[in-house]
C-alpha cells in the first residue's frame, strides 16, 4: 500500500471531498479508458503530466492494470517522495522545473530539457488531469506541442480543461489568483490543438455520469 502524506495531495478540497484519492483516480482512469474505447491500461505506456500522487495511489492501492506509468511533476517534493516510496518497476517519476504561475512561478526548465530526460520516448497515452486548468495560453500551447512529440502514431492524448463559449480566448475565473482557474474558449483551445498537431476525437461536458472531471478532450496525433 502506498500511503501519501496529506500535504502532498494536490487536489482541490471539493475533489478531496468526493472520496479517497485512489478511488477518484480509478474513476478517472476508467473514464479515460471508456473514452478511448479500451477496457483498461494493461500493456500500455502512459505519460501523466502534472501527475500529483493520485494515479499512483490508484495503480498501487486499487490494482489498476497498467503497462508502464511515467509521472512528471513540477513539485520536487512529490517526485522525491514517489521515487523513495514506490518500488514497482512499472512506475517512474521525473521532476520538471517548468514555469507555472500557480504551482512553480520560478521554474527555469523548458520542454526541450524534459524531452531529453524522457529520452524522446513515445507513449500510448499522454494525459493531464486538472493541469491545463492552471495554464496560461503560451504554456498550454507548448504543453500540447511537447506531448505531440511524445505520442505514438496510434496513441491518444486526454486532458481536462475549463471552457467558456463566449468572450476572450483566455480568462481567469478567479482573477485575484491567476492560474488557479484558467479557462479557454472552446474555439481557442481547439485552434491551439490543431496548431500543435492534434485532431480532436471527442469533447465532453463536465461531470459525465458523476465522474469528477471538468470539460475533457480526447485527441490523436494528426497523420
Ligand atoms: C490540480 S493538481 C492535479 C494532480 C493530478 N493530475 C490529479 O488529478 O490528481 C495539478 C498538478 O500539476 C502540476 N503541474 C502544473 N503545471 C505543470 C507542468 N507544466 N508540468 C508538470 N506538472 C505541472 C502541479 O504541481 C500539480 O501537482
Image: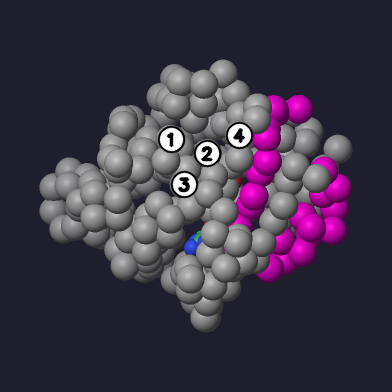
Cα distance, mark 4 to mark 3?
12 Å
Label 1 near label 4: C-beta < 8 Å?
no
**Classed neighbour count for the residue bearing mark 3: other residues with Cα under 10 Å, few (<14), some (14–19), many (≥20):** many
Q: Which mark is residue 124?
A: 2
Label 1 near label 2: C-beta < 8 Å?
yes
Where the N terminus falls, by quadrant?
Answer: top right
- Indicate which label's residue lies in the foreground, 4 or 1: 1
Pointer 3 residue: 151
Label 2 near label 4: C-beta < 8 Å?
yes
Pointer 4 residue: 44
The answer to which image quadrant residue 3 occupies is top right
Asked whether, in this view, residue 217 is left or right of residue 97, the answer is left
Asked whether, in this view, residue 81 is left or right of residue 148, the answer is right
Tag 1, which secondary structure? strand
**Stretch in magenta:** 63-88
Name the residue: 73% across, 46% down: 91
Q: Which mark is residue 154?
A: 1
Amino acid at each position: 500500500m502506498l500511503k501519501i502524506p496529506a500535504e502532498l495531495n494536490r487536489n482541490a478540497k471539493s475533489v478531496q471531498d468526493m472520496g479517497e484519492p485512489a478511488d477518484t483516480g480509478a474513476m478517472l482512469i476508467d473514464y479515460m479508458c471508456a473514452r478511448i474505447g479500451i477496457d483498461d491500461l494493461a500493456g500500455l505506456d502512459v505519460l501523466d503530466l502534472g501527475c500529483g500522487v493520485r494515479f499512483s495511489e490508484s495503480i498501487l492501492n486499487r490494482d489498476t492494470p497498467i503497462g508502464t506509468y511515467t509521472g512528471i511533476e513540477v513539485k520536487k517534493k512529490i517526485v522525491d517522495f514517489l521515487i523513495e516510496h514506490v518500488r514497482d518497476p512499472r512506475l517512474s517519476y521525473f521532476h520538471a522545473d517548468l514555469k507555472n504561475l500557480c504551482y512553480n512561478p520560478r521554474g527555469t526548465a523548458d520542454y526541450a530539457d524534459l524531452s531529453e530526460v524522457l529520452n524522446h520516448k513515445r507513449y500510448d497515452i499522454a494525459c493531464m488531469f486538472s493541469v491545463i486548468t492552471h495554464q496560461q495560453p503560451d504554456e498550454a500551447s507548448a504543453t500540447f506541442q511537447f506531448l505531440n512529440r511524445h505520442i505514438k502514431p496510434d496513441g491518444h492524448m486526454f486532458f481536462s480543461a475549463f471552457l467558456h463559449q463566449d468572450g476572450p480566448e483566455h480568462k481567469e475565473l478567479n482573477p485575484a489568483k491567476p492560474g488557479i482557474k484558467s479557462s479557454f474558449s472552446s474555439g481557442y483551445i481547439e485552434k491551439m490543438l490543431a496548431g500543435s498537431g492534434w485532431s480532436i476525437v471527442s469533447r465532453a461536458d463536465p461531470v459525465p455520469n458523476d465522474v469528477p472531471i471538468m470539460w475533457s478532450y480526447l485527441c490523436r496525433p494528426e497523420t
